[in-house]
Amino acid sequence: MRDFLLYLHIVGAAGWIGGGLFAIFAFPAVASSGPPAAASILESFEKRSGPYFGITSGLVLLSGIALVLTSDVFGWGDAFVLIGLGAFLITAIVESTLGRRANERLTSAAESGADLPRAVSSWRRISIIDLVVLFVVVWAMITKIGA
C-alpha cells in the first residue's frame, strides 16, 4: 500500500511541477503572439489549468495524508511533512489571489497588446515563486528533512 501511495504522490508532484514548467514557457510565448488569438488561447489554458492543477495538487495532498496516516515511521510533526502542508497552503493562497490577478492581467494585455511586457513579467514572477516553493518541497521530501 505504501508503494502505491508513494507512486501517486510522486506522479501528482511530477504533474504539478511539469504543468508549472510548461506554463512558464508557453503562456508568455502565446501572450506575445498577439491579438486576437493570444487572449482566447490563454483563456482556454486558464479554463483547463484549474481542473488540471486541482487534480495534481489534490493527488499530492491526499496521497501525502494517506502516507502519513499509514506510516509507522513518519508523522505530522516531521519537518518535511509540515513543509509540504505549509507549501500546499501557500501555493493555494498565492495562486488563488496573486496568480489569478496575474492571469487576468496577462490575458487582458494579450487581447489589447497594451502593457504586455509588464504583464508577462508580473505573471512570470508569480509563477516562478510558485515553482520555487514546489522545488523546496521536493527537496524536503527527498532529504526527509527533520525526520
Image: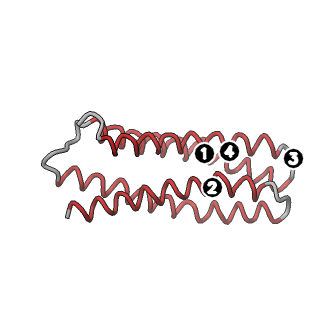
Element carrying mark 3: loop
Labels 3 and 1: the sequence-earlier one: 3
Element carrying mark 4: helix
Marks 1,2: beta carbons within 8 A: yes
Q: Nearer the viewer, residue 140 or 117?
A: 140
- Disc number at residue 114? 3
Marks 4,1: beta carbons within 8 A: yes
Name above or below for residue 140 compared with residue 45. above
70 sits to left or right of 14: left
Marks 2,4: beta carbons within 8 A: no
**Residue 65 x/y as whole percent:** 27, 52
Residue 128 image-quadrant placement: top right
Can you name the residue that lies furthest to the left here? 72
The residue singled out by tag 2 in the image is 23
The residue singled out by tag 4 in the image is 123
The residue singled out by tag 1 in the image is 127
- The quarter of the image holding the C terminus is top left
Decide: few, some or many residues near mark 4? Use Cα within 10 Å; few <14, some 14-19, many ≥20. Answer: many
| Colour pattern of the rendering | secondary structure
Q: At 21% across and 60% down in the image, what residue appears? A: 2
**Residue 63 x/y as whole percent:** 30, 58
Q: Nearer the viewer, residue 96 or 121?
A: 121
Q: Nearer the viewer, mark 3 or mark 1?
A: 1
Mark 3: amino acid: Ala
Mark 2: amino acid: Ala
Q: Marks 4 and 1, Cα distance to the nearest angstrom?
A: 6 Å
Q: At 75% across and 59% down in the image, what residue appears? A: 30
Q: Marks 4 and 3, Cα distance to the nearest angstrom?
A: 15 Å
Q: At 74% across and 45% down in the image, what residue appears? A: 120
